[in-house]
Amino acid sequence: MIHAHHPRGLYPLFFTELWERFSYYGMRALLTLFMVAPVAGGGLGFDIPRAGIIYGTYAMSVYMLSIPGGFLADNVLGARRSVLIGGIIIACGHFTLALSSETTFFLGLVLIALGTGMLKPNISTMVGSLYEPGDVQRDAGFSIFYTGINIGAFAAPLVTGWLAQSDQFKSMLQGWGLDPAHSWHWGFAAAGVGMVIGLIVYVAMGNRIAHVGRPPASDAPRPWGKLAWVLAGSTVLFALVRLSDTNPRFAWIRYGYVGVPVLAIIGLGFRASLDARRIAAVLVFSLASLVFWAVFEQAGSTISLFGDQLTRTEMFGYKFPSAWFQSVNSLFVMILAPLFALFWIKLGARQPSSPVKFIIGLLFLGLSFLLMVPAAKLTVDGKVSPFWIVGLFFLQTLGELCLSPVGLSTMTKLAPQKLLGLVMGIWFLATALGNKLAGVMAAEFTATDGHSLAKFFLMQSLWVGAATLAMVACVPWLKRLMGGVK
């Protein structure tokens, strides 16, 4: 898979990321289901609104902590050491989840979020550092790296879902004289084992990446003041978000996720400075991505619950764990990503601009939730076919492949050199808040009223539709803001 002309360091980074994503998606596939499962069934017995809020806060924290995680690596630890420390913390988090108590559950989530914030931004930085600027192999190297992500994300729910939910494994536990209700914790432990395998590969092949991700020189000044600002800003934002969760009088804060960027876009978009206008363009793209992830990331909450409670988990006479639905998106990415790459190459200079690719991405996303409207209505008569969820993931993957790879690339092109860190921070923050909104909206999910559920999907589809139309209206202005960047 990784040919001789790619740097040898791509091997350890490919496998470390594959196993880190195995641990992340393996755990994510179980998270909401475990929270809402009755206590007698080994779960926590939370109601859906509480589970949605916790899921959203956890997913938000992972991305929000990438900002201080990246900053620490750049200025203090170096990317190589940050990835190792992050991986160890993640593994500890998964094994903490494998213990059976509510306290260890929350502690495990905190550890995984902290570790992922250290590992995730820095392993991608190291892949980039393996290549010289302008190396034609760089894009292909990242494509190989992303394949690793999707192999991990595809395999993980199949393994952890079988351990946590399957009747076969529960009867095996019973045969060993163990409590089958604890099967969830075996799933979480398997995610931890995945991370440990990743760490072993990383350390064993460490000599191949010894030249990248070094810490800054020991005599270089450390910007502790800036780090304090980054941590303080992240803490204040987290506190505001939690306030909007815990106190109904402060629920209006959520409108700020969209309102504040809109005000900033208006303020910067009409300035004479090209850098200011480009930051306005960055904010437009970030806002579109926030809307995208707010719906897309319900895969682990709303769609997970729909798959578990309202969908027939049986094909050709074989009953499968509902967590297996979480593998469908990654399978479609692996099938469709090479086709998309070929398609863009074939179009060459005629391919759509970045704003148009974002619009196509949002359009497919809106259609995916529109597809769930008739599916929700059919639940009135009983459980529906698994092909509704397969169709949803197919449309969402088409949207993801138009928007996600283009987003990061566009950010790096638009960012003024001295503001690259800020721009990447804005991008991660939009993803974080999108994930948070996904949890907030999942709190409205109901499995007992098909018509209310149909309205739930329709409203979100219309919300994405409105964002898509707003983006279409902005395209001419957005191209002027981008100042020649395609």
Image (cartoon, helix red, strand yellow):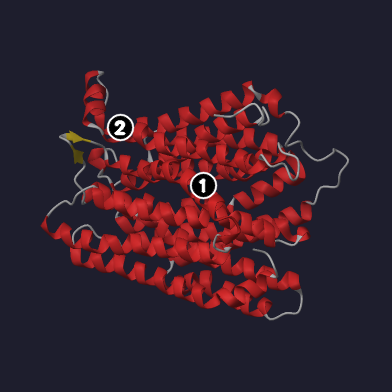
- Quadrant in the rendering for residue 440: bottom left
User: What is the secondary structure assignment of the residue under circle 1?
Assistant: helix
Residue 118: x and y, percent?
Answer: 62, 42
Left or right: 136, with 61 as reference point: right
Q: Residue at x 55, y 66 (%)?
A: 355
In this view, the residue farthest toward the right is: 219
Q: Residue 131 bears which disc, if any? A: none
Q: Residue at x 63, y 21 (%)?
A: 204
In this view, 91 is above or below 287: above
Callouts 2 and 1 close, C-beta under 8 Å: no
Depth check: give the residue in front, 438 or 472.
472
Residue visible at 31% across and 45% down in the picture? 33
Q: Measured from the top left, where is residue 53 in percent x and y?
A: 40, 57
Q: Kindly report which numbered mark, 2 or 1, lies closer to the viewer in this rendering.
A: 1
Q: Is residue 409 above or below residue 190?
A: below
Residue 162, disc: 2
Disc 1 target residue: 342
Task: Identify the residue at image location x=37%, y=55%.
Answer: 395
Which residue is situated farthest in the top direction here? 176
Q: Is residue 366 left or right of residue 85?
A: left
Q: Residues within 10 Å of mark 2 (few under 14, many from 20)?
A: many
Quadrant location, the N terminus: top right
Residue 344 percent across, percent down from the top left: 53, 53
Q: Is residue 387 visible?
A: yes
Marks 2/1: CA–CA distance:
35 Å
Q: Nearer the viewer, residue 20 or 242?
A: 20
Label total for image: 2
Which amino acid lies under the numbered mark 2 shown in the image of this protein? Trp
Q: Quadrant of residue 84?
A: top right
Upstream in the sequence, badge 2 or badge 1?
2
